[in-house]
Image: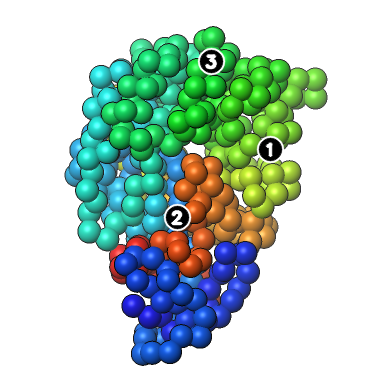
Amino acid sequence: MLLKNVSFINELFEKEAGDILIENGKISAIGIIDGEGEDMSGMVALPGFVDIHIHGAAGGDASDASAESLGKISAYLAGKGVTSFCPTTMTLGRDTLLNIVSAIRDYKGCGNGAKIAGINLEGPFIAMSKKGAQNGDFVREGTVEELDALYEASGGLLKLITIAPEAFDSAEFIKHASKKCTVSIGHSAANAQQCSAALEQGAAHFTHLYNAMTPMTHREAGIVGAALDSSATCELICDGEHICETVLRNTFKILGENRACVISDSMRAAGLGEGEFELGGQQVFVREGDGVARLADGNIAASITNLYQEFKNLLSFGIDFKTALKSCTINPARAIGCDLEIGSIAVGKAADLVFVDENMDIKRVYINGTLA
């Protein structure tokens, strides 16, 4: 397939014009290419968005351990410009998690929906005091043996795991796990010193920065301060509810254009409107006019947003285009070690393209060169 007269954001995240040749689902050439093709004038091609932390959407949840639910999520995301994602589990029992990762491993896709880039385990090796909407009945200490069992059951798809380094004797666990996947600090009550030690041991990422972790104060940096002071990547939920826009602006100033990873952290209610839903075995509620799902006590349980809406939010908050786009594409791809395959428009990478108009509204989405 040849796309002609394409205005696109190149791998340096600068605007460029040319033709794009797609063969076998990948971009095989970019430039002035002879031949008949489809004229793409009047639109701009962005790289496909990558959501590395998403529990569910459109009625489906990764923890359902079913192809039907994964298909619902995949189809929904494709319509929102998200071409790759990491189904994310909750804190659940060992056998349940083994069943979930096995189901994700065996998932064969749903036509032209978003692709699974890997599996994200949010827990279960977290701090009870910072469990948030996670089910405390299943919070436990991490063991290398359980990690290896989950990794094997995933068929190597495990890309990311959230742990609380202070919640158990985690040094050897982090050293071992970081050789298999990205270790992220989150749902944790660690102080800055404990956090820095975990980074030295191999942790390299932070789960939904600011949420469910020790804050930064003027006398104790906490996880937030340690994260900002490190070189690690940091997840940010940019729905305007989990983090206010003023804090987001300040955070992006510190993280720059290469360290922020926008995530949705959405659950099955995303795209469905108000109602009562289930998340990790707990009831959560989406009420009219509310932008998040909440527990019965009113605390935020999860988001109901999507990456493309968050991207537009960031632009409206004053974040520059290049930083906002990288934070939704190449940065999360790099955080899970998939940046050579996805995350930017470049020869040799998957032909994952999101065409938008002058108002930044999505007009077409291609996944592996196929129209979604």
Q: Is residue 264 visible?
A: no
Pick whichever of labels 1 and 2 is earlier in the sequence: 1
Residue 151, x across and y down, in percent: 36, 28
Residue 255, x across and y down, in percent: 69, 44
Residue 98, x across and y down, in percent: 27, 25
Q: Secondary structure at mark 1?
A: loop
Q: Which residue is mark 3?
A: 172
- Where does the C terminus fall, quadrant-wise? bottom left
Furthest-top residue in this view: 169
The kind of residue on which mark 3 rests is Glu
Q: Is residue 9 visible?
A: yes
What scheme was used to colour the molecule? rainbow
Q: Which residue is mark 1?
A: 231
Q: Secondary structure at mark 3?
A: helix
Q: Which residue is mark 2?
A: 341
The span from disc 2 to disc 3 (Cα, nearest Å) is: 31 Å
